[in-house]
Amino acid sequence: MAGLLTLMFASSALAWLLDQWINRALAFLIVAVIWAVIAAVAVTIGRRRAQEIEPIPKTVDTLKEDVEWAKQQKS
């Protein structure tokens, strides 16, 4: 929670600092765009790392056994 509040106050401070030189709405828009770029990079990295994760072989075997058990229960 403290980290989130820190980011919010730091973002607001940056926007107010930019407000000294440019229009207030534009200053806040610039800060929002910066956060959007950071979020896009984080999502891309997260997806890449998630694709690299391989399932545990024991889990795959267990799932195959579960499928076979379910087929037997059906018939």
Image: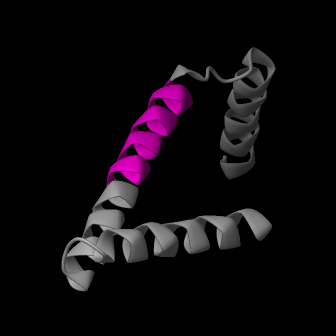
Q: Which residues are magenta?
A: 37-51
For residue 48: magenta? yes
- Residue extending farthest front: 20
Q: How is the image coloured?
A: one colour
Can you give x and y, in whole percent of width and height, for residue 54 in the image? 62, 20
For residue 66: magenta? no
Residue at coordinates 57% horizontally, 72% vertically from top-left?
8
Q: Is 22 left or right of 71, judged from the image as shown?
A: left
Looking at the image, which is closer to me, 54 or 59?
54
Residue at coordinates 70% horizontally, 24% vertically from top-left?
60
Q: Is residue 71 above or below residue 59?
A: below
Looking at the image, which is closer to me, 24 or 74?
24
Query: Quadrant location of residue 58?
Result: top right
Residue at coordinates 60% horizontally, 23% vertically from top-left?
53
Residue at coordinates 35% horizontally, 65% vertically from top-left?
31
Can you give x and y, in whole percent of width and height, for residue 17 in the image? 40, 70
Q: Is residue 19 above or below residue 46?
A: below
Q: Is 54 left or right of 69, judged from the image as shown?
A: left
Q: Is 22 left or right of 18, judged from the image as shown?
A: left
Q: Is 47 left or right of 40, judged from the image as shown?
A: right
Task: Say how many tags the image has.
Answer: 0
Can you give x and y, in whole percent of width and height, for residue 73 in the image? 74, 48
Looking at the image, which is closer to me, 61 or 73?
61
- Main SS type for the magenta part? helix
- What is the quadrant of the N terminus in the image? bottom right
